[in-house]
Image (tube, rainbow, N blue to C red):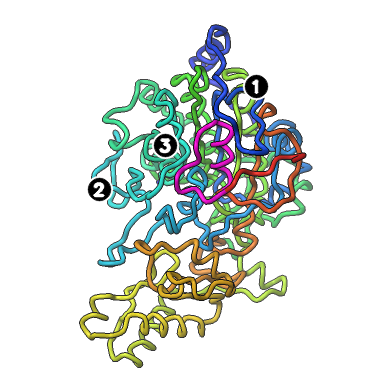
Amino acid sequence: MKSLSHFSRRALLVLASALLASCTSIPPPPAGPAPAAGIATGGARPRLVVFLAIDGLPQRQVMAYRDQLAPDGFARFLDRGAWYSEARHAHAFTVTAAGHATMLTGAYPDRTGIIGNGWRDPATGAPVYNTSDPGAKYIGNETRPLDGTSPRNLRVETLGDVLRRADPRSRVIALSGKDRGAILTAGKSGVAYMYMDGSGEFASSTYYMQEHPAWVTEFNARKPADRYFKAQWTPLLPQAAYERSIPDDQPWFATPGGKLPMTLGGADAAPGPSFYRALLRSPFIDALSLDFARAAVAAEALGRDAATDILAVSLSGHDYVNHAWSAESRLSHDHFLQLDRLLQSFFRDLDASVGAGNYLAVLTSDHGFMPPPELAAAQGRPAGRLNSGQILARLNAGLEKRFGEPKLLLGYSASSLLADKSAIARKNLDADAVAQEARTLLLAEPGIAAAYTRRELESGSRAGAPLFDALRKSWHPQVSGDVQYTLKPDFMFGSATATHGSPHEYDSHVPILLWGPSWVGAGRVDTRVEVVDIAPTLAAILGVAPPPASEGKPLPLPGH
């Protein structure tokens, strides 16, 4: 769809922020009900929760480059906030939609129904996109089949839904470079804005409103994405600072142009769709997203009255950079540092407009990232790329040999195999026997770590078996297929430079960082925690019930 450390603020936003900061008649938000044990509230709820998701950021990068951080970006959390060294996603299929759906629901995919970015309808085999909805269209932009336009497929509530039911004055606004990054954090009752890679605009959909508010129209009319046409992405630091990352232009880079400095739109005569798409693989999409967030804070007066608001910002650029060139690359290293400086600038603006003591900031990621198989192999680890089409053909051939029916598997559905139920019924075959044979054949393939059948997942009969719990958390009985599987470490499907989607350490270990001195204190916590713990933690701070489907528990705080 869809040097950089300083960005000019538009005069209108500066004026709006200054006016908001000068207001002194707004009372502080009232204290909520008694919080859960271990949660400090300082006697009042935050006026604003700023929820930040950095798409595709593994915890190892936060630690590897900590000495190169600016004073007040990620360091605000690491030096003056609460941070969790052992935070994990506990579901197996660690992809963008599944991860974003866990963050503010507190629930795994087995409850949210968001089992992947896309899947097949179990009854018909038709493709389903995680946030697709034929009844909703983008406002002022083309809507293609399966574009993400609403939370229709999200089967549970978010923290924002609970908050707005408790107090309808609360506003919940989410934005992202990806539709799923915005929609799945906005929930059912918030408002989502998505970057449009055909126009360079941010747009909502008719699920939320029929037309944009004036501030969104004005933001888009200024064509802020065009400001980066022919802009150069140049490294922030001298070359020697990047010796701990992989140099540019590796032969295994699947995406051309993996070298800094990089000119955005270099081959284009004028800004257009190819340029707007290229922005996604750069720090400029994150700068643009944070500018839109600033506009939302000012125009919607977020954090300026007694009802707590939520601003959810999913920054997408890091995921695109890592897919193109890997988390081990100098490009990813520099992109992380660019994000750090962008966050520092954003926090300083929030300090001025909302007030440093009035908001709580939370940062996490939807998933980490695996190293490229070529790099893993060069380091002596078993690794490789798997051809999913060839594997499927072998599985169907094996099933035909046993059951006498060709193509008993329709294909892959998220991280499961989907059987052709009509063919099974037509031949009067035992569906469980077909699934069990498919599992046996799949486990004989190189690179497959574990696989379990529908019956095993429903009954829990294999509890305690390798990776069973993580696979069960990624499997939904009404949405998923018939054999849930995951790959061995350092194996991947596809031709991207690198990817994610496993329960292994490089994909599951992500940051959880909190800042808000009145509510969370400061210090490192080494207890193992999970991303599903964020929602009940925020609910306790806000004095509301956790989302009904939440499976997490309040995070332990430093010193407790």
Q: Indicate which disc residue 249 carries.
A: none
Depicted 405 relative to depicted 360: above or below: below
User: Contact, CB < 8 Å: mark 1 with mark 3?
Assistant: no
Where residue 63 sits in the image (x, y, percent)? 73, 48
Q: Earlier in the sequence, mark 2 or mark 1?
A: 2
Looking at the rendering, in which quadrant would you find the C terminus?
Answer: top right
Depicted 49 relative to depicted 149: above or below: above
Q: Which residue is mark 3?
A: 161
- Please tell me how crowded label 1 is: few (under 14), some (14-19), or many (20+) other residues with Cα within 10 Å: few
Q: Earlier in the sequence, mark 2 or mark 3?
A: 2
Query: What residue type is disc 3 on?
Result: Asp
Taking depth in this image into account, of 502 and 36 the one nearest to the observer is: 36
Residue lying at 35% horizontally and 72% vertically, measured from the top left: 418
Q: Which residue is mark 1?
A: 357
Please say whether residue 89 is one of the residues in the magenta stretch. Answer: no
Query: What residue type is disc 1 on?
Result: Gly
- Please tell me whether mark 3 sits on a helix, a strand or a loop: helix
Q: Which residue is mark 2?
A: 134
- Please tell me whether mark 1 sits on a helix, a strand or a loop: loop
Indicate the quadrant where residue 379 lies. Answer: bottom right
Whether residue 116 can be seen here: no
